[in-house]
Amino acid sequence: YEQARLWLVPLDEPTKAIPLLKKTLELAPDHAGAVATLRQALLLAREYEAALPWFDREVELTGASAAKAALLYAKGGILETALGRPS
């Protein structure tokens, strides 16, 4: 997970972070940080369709209602703007 974060943030290499984050989630499926970081990496890599289920997974792991609402709103924005699917 930490290695993936390094690929993502300072090195700006989301495609190198993605497989490491997926491996982290195979080993620890409820790792909220890895879920959020994978979602971000997929968006940065413009893999919008692949990012969609990770919004939902993060909503499942998030307790705060405001955070859930923000995630669902952001997912709607991706669906509408990046994927051209109006609600």
Image (tube, helix red, strand yellow):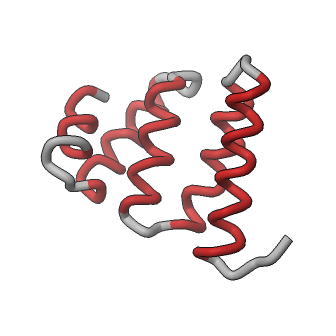
Front residue of this view, candidates 27 and 45:
45
Hey, which residue is sitting farthest right in the picture?
87
Q: Is residue 34 above or below residue 55?
A: above
Residue 54 position, x and y percent, is 60, 46
Q: Is residue 3 above or below residue 43?
A: above
Residue 4 position, x and y percent, is 26, 38
x 27%, y 35%: residue: 5
x 68%, y 29%: residue: 67
Q: Is residue 86 above or below residue 50?
A: below
x 64%, y 56%: residue: 52
Hey, which residue is sitting farthest left in the picture?
11
Front residue of this view, candidates 19 and 74:
74
Front residue of this view, candidates 31 and 27:
31
x 69%, y 40%: residue: 70
Quadrant into which the N terminus falls: top left
Q: Is residue 74 left or right of residue 37?
A: right
Q: Is residue 41 left or right of residue 52?
A: left
Hey, which residue is sitting farthest top in the picture?
63
